[in-house]
Amino acid sequence: MFSATDTIVAIATPPGRGGIGVVRLSGPEAREIAAGLITHGKPLEPRYATLTTVVGDRRAAATADGSATASAERPVESSSKASAERGSAACSRAIDTGSQGRVDADVIDQIVATYFPAPHSYTGDHVVELSAHGSPVVLQTIVSAAIEAGARLAEPGEFTLRAFLNGRMDLAQAEAVADLIESVTPLQARAAFDQLQGTLTRAIGEIDRALFELIARLEASVDFPEEGYHFVDPGAVAQAIDGLRARTTALLAASHRGRLVREGFQVTIAGKPNVGKSSLFNALAGAARAIVTDVPGTTRDLVSEVVDLDGLRVTLVDTAGLRAANDAIEAEGVRRSHEAQRVADVLLVVVDRSAPLEDSDRELIASTDGRARVIVVNKADCEPSWTRNALGAAAGSVVDASALSGEGLEVVRQRLLAALDVDVHQDRPAITNVRHIALVRRADEALVRASRAALENGASLSEEFVLADLQDARFALEEIAGRRVSDDLLAHIFSTFCIGK
């Protein structure tokens, strides 16, 4: 695990160029290190945005034992003059006039510095955020200067880890931070933000409190055996456990939809060559991602694109046409097509309305029977070569569409949602994370065992048997919030975060 006492630094904004970039410092020496990088001669005021300049050495901060008066106006004027003379604000030499004289320093950029004192910061430690122009070179130079001044480069997720360790959020909320950053649809973002605000924490907390009260009453019976079951009636115990199970099963009932919201699902487009798979792929993706030609077998490899389907993240996968391969490359493409079909959540089976229906079309429809699928009769804008009756029992579930004209595409999207059996317009699910789902399921199973034990053999079993299962349930719930979790698990969870968060 990382040291929680170092002062750490990292770029907190995404890689690339932009109007603004933020370098974040956190730790006991954050304010002192930041003071050594900027020309502002006074201590930074808490939660007050200070316009200043950041320099590549610490001489500006050392002027007359820290009494330099680099006001918000002066750095702007001197920096702009130097920029005009040398043509580069990031690399110019500037003069900062203080009450005791003048100091030459390597100016990196004009910035806004904001200090958040502990414990009222994101991490719970002292935090300083330096908002500079969004040049990767400028931001990296600031980070390097901070490291030279005594900071350590942050590990992935270390800022949020400190927030967890300092009690600013629980583990479920910390994981929601990563989900919020990774979200690609509005529904994903809203679900992640709900969890960051504590929806899952509150739901689990209510179950845990009720479970704790029941455990306390049972332990009282164990501690005072001469009282027998006077503290808790066996029937009342079983009834209380069933009440707890109603809450865990409600969470699990929404977990399938929650997992789809968080992780999305895969739609694999399958069919023989030249039925319009790539055209349909491009139409659904809203971009010409796949090459479309009249030559059969144009698509040799898998092509994927992530799209938003009514708030759900969907990975569309275009595949090679299914036929006897003419060469080794196409054979590998066909093999990958079959593999993509195997792992797909939904299949989009495409047949060509303008060409005669072949045995290969019928075989694909037959082989995918029983799978979640949508059968698309493509090229609805062309003269038909066959009728729906040629598809037999599958005729009633097909969608007529045209990738070229856009006809039927909205129906295809709605059929995809129907094939998943998910209503995205329901209330946002409280549980979306696979780890959380597994732990709630483990708690639910422990409650089932506890309920059986409470009534086993005419309720003659010792309360200790019930207590053991109830404790197992509570341990599982505590893992969700992070109150009972190993260092290895913490390291694994936070290693998936981006650096700077």
Image: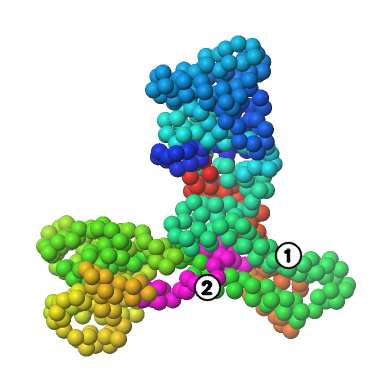
Residue drawn at x 69%, y 41% as measured from the top left:
119
Splitting the image into 4 quarters, where does residue 403 fall? bottom left
Please state the horizontal and vertical placement of residue 446, each as a whole percent of the image: 63, 70
Q: Mark 2 or 1, which is nearer the eye?
A: 2
Kindly give the residue lying farthest to the top in the view shown. Answer: 101
Specify start and end residues of the magenta stretch as a single range. 415-444
Element at label 2: loop
Name the side, left or right, on which 396 lies relative to 115.
left
On screen, residue 306 above or below 272: above
Residue marked by disc 1? 209
Q: Is residue 102 visible?
A: yes
Mark carried by residue 426 = 2
Q: Counting residues from the N terminus, which is met first, the one under dot 2 or under dot 1?
A: 1
Is 416 colored magenta in this rendering? yes
Residue type pointed to by label 2: Gln
Is 163 colored magenta in this rendering? no
Q: Nearer the viewer, residue 235 or 110?
A: 110
Residue type pointed to by label 1: Arg
Residue drawn at x 52%, y 23% as measured from the top left:
77
Q: Is residue 468 visible?
A: no
Splitting the image into 4 quarters, where does residue 462 fall? bottom right
Please state the horizontal and vertical placement of residue 157, each as a whole percent of the image: 53, 44
